[in-house]
Image: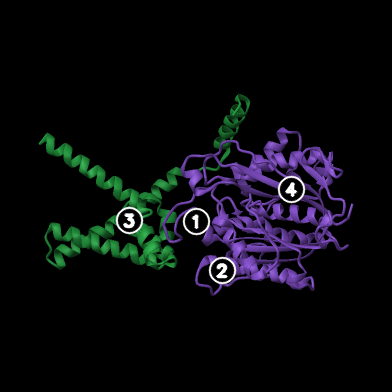
Chain colours: A purple, B green
Amino acid sequence: MAKHRLGGQTVKLENPPCILSRATIVGKKEGQGPLGEYFDVVLEDDLWGEKTWEKAECRMYQEAAKMAITRAGKQPQDINYLFGGDLLNQIITANFAARTLGIPFFGLYGACSTLTESMSLGAMLISAGYADLVLCVTSSHFCTAERQYRFPLEMGTQRPPTAQWTVTGAGAFLLSNDMKPPYITHITTGKVIDYGITDTNNMGAAMAPAAAATIKAHFEDTQQGPDAYDLIVTGDLGWFGRELTIDLLKKEGYDISDRFIDCGCEIYSKDQDVHAGGSGCGCSAVVFGAYILRKMEEGVYKRILLLSTGALLSTTSCQQGESIPGIAHAITIDMDRG
Amino acid sequence: MDVKQQKLNKEYQIYVQRKMPKSNLLRDCILAFLVGGIICTIGQAVNNLGKSYFNLNTEEASAFTAIVMIFIGALLTGLGVYDDIGKYGGAGSVVPITGFANSIVSPAMEFKKEGYVFGVGSKLFSIAGPVLVYGISASVLVGLIYFFLK
């Protein structure tokens, strides 16, 4: 077995890279939510002076990337790799932004799990000595996602209680081999799990088994339990998916309920008419970047497990009656280098 | 898929069904009834207006009502109000002719950015299309049955 593997799905990084800098940009509705004050930029309107929603999302992506680079005192040419993705067909946001940024680029699609997918890959590259600086950026936009996956915005439809609201937001994280906490110490790569959920308005239920499976695999591989973490954070399971994950893990003998939050539940307040909570690539990116890392710096949390959760469906697959596979990738963020 | 996984899936799906928050059916029905009723009452008022004020006969007044109601539906969609009505009204705002206007105007607005031919032109009936296909097919079928039974 490779030297740094633990169990079936986890690696312990030999040289844990740090999150050197970060940037978050969110839309108006997210800015009005309970975490509004933590974000770097809050847009006044979701079009941001651009002609299309897609252009606005791409600009959010670019600006977040540039801001993270500038904050670390670096130039785009210093960055070895850009890992990123978004929710749109052919990941046009990430591709078009990479065209402007001019950094060697790997485009990723893991639906809403793309954040920890990109950070997993970036962290492994740095730890192995193949890169000094890796930029990981993901974004989503309510209006671009809505027109691609669902209905036109002005269409008068009713959303069921389990439906989620795509977060308008972009988050960028610059990983480096510097000695500056927080560090990424472990990576648990998820498997695609499908329990046969077909309801596209119930993504939480589709993704919860994947989140539970990855958390369980992480605990088994590292031979630790929930106690090893101050906080376990999932990306966008929403209120209902969060409950299901707690139940699924209880069946496996792990009780995480006292230290488990979901970014989709944190980003909006319940009176913002978002039903089951937020979703999208941007959801875990902006909540983790703006809020959770801030709390870690303030010393509230020392060691956390972050999982971005993705529902791997397309408009074609769900119209053809296919079920919705889910995936979740976990990374351990630690203020100590371990 | 093996039998064990199928059993697990089934159990999980039943468990999700049981546990998931449900829409309040009674509240939704009452709201749909009220919103739909209000829209139809406005339609009736327009119809009466057409008959008494413009001296239209029954057939002309029906066409007049349809035109006015479609205009109102389209206008409220353009002003960004109809989706808010739809959020509360549900089927009550979808079924009347104003809902039909909403289902055509909203994609027209949304897909204008893809151009007038491949955007507006091809997406205009993306929601109303199925309604037209099966509505017209059903009316032809009923017409044929009526023709042969007569």
Taking the image as shown, residue A256 lies to the left or right of residue A44, namely right
Give coordinates of residue A74: x percent, y percent.
78, 72
Distance in Å between CA atoms under marks 3 and 2:
30 Å
Distance in Å between CA atoms under marks 2 and 4:
29 Å
Q: Chain of mark 4?
A: A
Q: Amino acid at mark 3?
A: Phe
Q: Which residue in the protein does label 3 denote? A: B100
Q: Are marks 2 and 4 on the same chain?
A: yes
Q: Amino acid at mark 2?
A: Ala
- Which is nearer the eye, A151 or A253? A151
Taking A41 as reference, is A160 above or below it? above
Numbered badge on residue A148: 1
Callout 4 touching callout 1 (CB < 8 Å): no
Q: Chain of mark 3?
A: B
- Which is nearer the eye, B92 or A313? A313
Give coordinates of residue A208: x percent, y percent.
64, 42
